[in-house]
Amino acid sequence: MQADSTLPFDTSGLGPDPGCLGKNDAPLLEVRDLRVTYPGAGGPVSPVNGLSLRISAREVVGLVGDAGSGKSTAALALLGLVRPPGRIAGGQVLLHGRDLLTLPDAELRAIRGRDIGIIVQNPRAALNPMLKIGRQIGTVWRAHNPGSRTEAAAKAVEMLRMVGINDPERRVAAFAHELSGGMAQRALIAMALSSKPRLLIADEPTSGLDVTIQAQFLDQMWQTVQDTGSAMLLVSQELGVIANYCDRVLVLHEGRIVEDAPVRQFFADPQHPYSRDVLRLYRERGAIWPAQVSGPAVIRAEGLTKKFPIRHSASVVHAVDAASLTIAKGEALGLVGESGSGKTTVGRCLVRLLEPTAGRVVFQGRDLTGIAKADLRAMRARVQIVFQDPFDSLNPRWTVQQLLDEPLKLHTALDAAARREKAAAALARVDLPADLLMRKPRGLGAGALQRINIARALICDPDFIVLDEPTSVLAPRARNGLIDLLARLRAELGISFLFISHDLTTVRYLCQRVAVMYLGQIVEEGTVEQVFTDPRHPYSRALLAAHLFPDPTRRRVDHPVPAPLQGEIPSPIDLPAGCYLASRCGHVTDACRVTPQVLTPLGGARAVRCARAVAGQI
Amino acid sequence: MSTSDLPAIAPARPDWLFRFGVAIVAVVTVLALIGPHIGPYSPTLTTPRVAVPPPGLTQIPGLLWGQITGTLPYPPHWFGTDVSGYDVFSRVIAAPRTDLVIALLANGLSLALGVLLGLLAGYFRNAGTELLMRVSDVMQSFPVFISAMVLVALAGRSTANIIIALAFVYTPIYIRLTRAEVMAQTARGFVEAARALGQPELQIALRHVLPNSLTPALIQSSVTIGFAILLTAGLSFVGAGVRPPTPEWGLMISTGANQIILGEWWPSVFPGIAISLTVFGFAVLGNALERRYAGG
């Protein structure tokens, strides 16, 4: 074995390392007491501090942990890599019993990519923008395999086909910017798998991808791992990902493993406080809201349409296409759909941050679309919005006090003392201490910032709030806290919400009704119960099928999954003539392709935009 | 999460260029305050000794000793005297009052005007502000020196006119810098959040966007002050600047230039060194500031 490793080109093509034959119980990878330290202001800090773990062949192991628990640092350190100025301060990384950390650089380089592959978080940043995809994959392959450029090029095509990229002969000539996020991610996985590594490390491989692409991608990666007989370490904060694909779960906390359990046991009986905290929300199931609220409509959109003109062009982007929705007093409506479906645009039109191209928004009986500027400003106290990115939505130069003061100064006649009191009360309402008032946003965590945003939106006691993906950038623990808070505020204040999200688990927890959007149209509407248990529209079905519910007893990989939608989402500039889903739908007929579909009520608060579903044919 | 768990990387190398820049700027500023009063001679009165060369290196200790013991007939001319009998040293250290004051006022004026116009042009993007940008394009397409020279020639040679001319040629730089930053800041979430709270547009521009857009312009200031000093001197050199006998580096170089051919290098070289050091100091300071604070 030692002789082999000094001549890495000799070992290729010999199949599995003979050294590990007959040792199937022996772990593929064993990490002992790994430590990574960085110089810090108050002495060195160790994001990875005494990490020990084992991974066997053919195993998919999930690594979870809060933001800052050292997951990414640990994933890199397994390859002997550390971001400067850090260094590996101790421990062993044994691959087939050989310590990688003591190997000379050249041997370690040969092992990276050949024996251990890594897939990093941001696919676009990981691809070289100057080189064609095929060339990049070929280069990695040639680094570990003897072969000519022509062979490498053929190999690249083969790899791209294996990871499910359509038309790989053409795609090898594409540059990174010509690929969608999902395709770039698949190109990376093709690169990582090109030398059939025995261990694949995937660090949040699907963050930033849409749910349907995420599911397709993870399915593929899981299948590849099964087919090639390698093992996978899947680093993720998403419990849905962990529950559906992993066999075993490791919990990382303060740089070491604090829990190691088979996936079902982890979800059924978490041991560590962090695990319990993260899983709590998913374990409290069941509707906590009255199924339906019948009351006067607080806000109503009728035929809301928004088109964005494209500069220097006659064409327009159809962002929202005649969307109508009603939200009753005290009701929460969830608006779900993939990115580009127009849900954010609907939210912005409702609070008139965007001027709708056509249609009306009626708030408490008043049409907001034709309202005078001064009236609109006064109305802002009653209708509020919380944005997706908490780091961006607070002025970095203002103190929290000033930030909370702004709406009060605009909409109330309170004096400074009364405003300060009110600001402190608003912070208390979102469970933040009053001493934050003197702080500036810099240095606060995403969870705290989003709470400040919510406090700011609530400070003038509005009647209606749009929450635009308020939890999407938060780590699971902070996200759970925020969802708890929103549920409590809903119960206490009786405000109406529009909750825009791609996270179906959260929508199910917080909302009574849900509307599904696709390409600017609402394709299905109903109570959460109706839509989640019995989706009628083919798109809703696909969306729900792709959603990774954190339930290890119904693992996606253990059951046949319904066929995903085919192809790519059509461009919102050049929309299909008939049903927008026709090109991707498995139930398509010729009539679908030419007949525009209408949202048809089915009775009982349900409506669906599919003639075949209405007729009961699917 | 991957970046959040990495410690922030502190700038490790000593910023000695920054310190050097600060030192030069400090000396020039002090000279602008007291320079005209600390020289051995009046900067605007001639002495009977014409075209005296500066003392040789070997004479310096003796002269210093003589100065301390008070045995010299008159204070030494450290940088020599020029063809009219002015003491070059006294004039070199008196000149910052003219040069720096002109540069500071011109920079302040163009900074204020440029930031304001840049804010308008970046925040309210309409036909009017588009026209403003095209006008500033035209202004920027002329070399600053030519523009300033023509402006002073048209308006007349006075300190106020020089300041206005310099402010005029530097304003487009600030408009452009601020406009770009304003456009970036306007796209940020807190601007939309303020709009959602009902804050009027002008208030958003002034209270949210402006404070977050000042950094590039403030950093540019240091560089601009340096170059304004150079431009002031340049204008005097071609005869479109301050009037003699005002102590001013460019003017001194200009008057001394005629005698260089006779071997009298000192009336021009010493103010030349002073200009170089000053411009260099301000530029280095601006550079260091940019590295430290840009994007922060």
Image (cartoon, coloured by chain):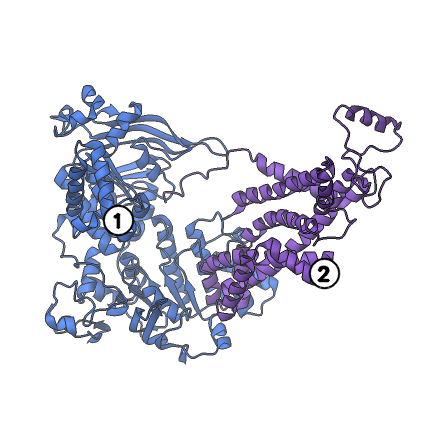
Chain colours: A blue, B purple
Give the image location of residue A30, x and y in percent.
25, 29
**For mark 1, does the 10 Å Cα neighbourhood hold few (<14), some (14 to 19), or many (20 or more) residues?**
many
Horizontal and vertical percent for residue A139? Answer: 23, 37
Identified by mark 1, the residue type is: Ala
Q: Circle 1 — which element?
A: helix
Q: Which residue is mark 2?
A: B156
What is the crowding at mark 2: few (fewer than 14 residues within 10 Å), some, or many (at least 20)? some
Q: What chain is tagged by disc 2? A: B
Inspect this view and state whether residue A88 appears: yes
Rounded to the nearest angstrom, the CA distance separating label 1 from label 2 is 65 Å
Residue shown at 33% from the left, 26% from the top: A91
Q: Which residue is mark 1?
A: A184
Q: Quadrant of the N terminus of chain B?
A: top left
The answer to whether A616 is drawn above or below residue B184 in the figure is below
Residue B110 in sight = no
**Are the residues under badges 1 and 2 in a single subunit?**
no
Mark 1 belongs to which subunit? A
Residue A568: mark in rendering: none
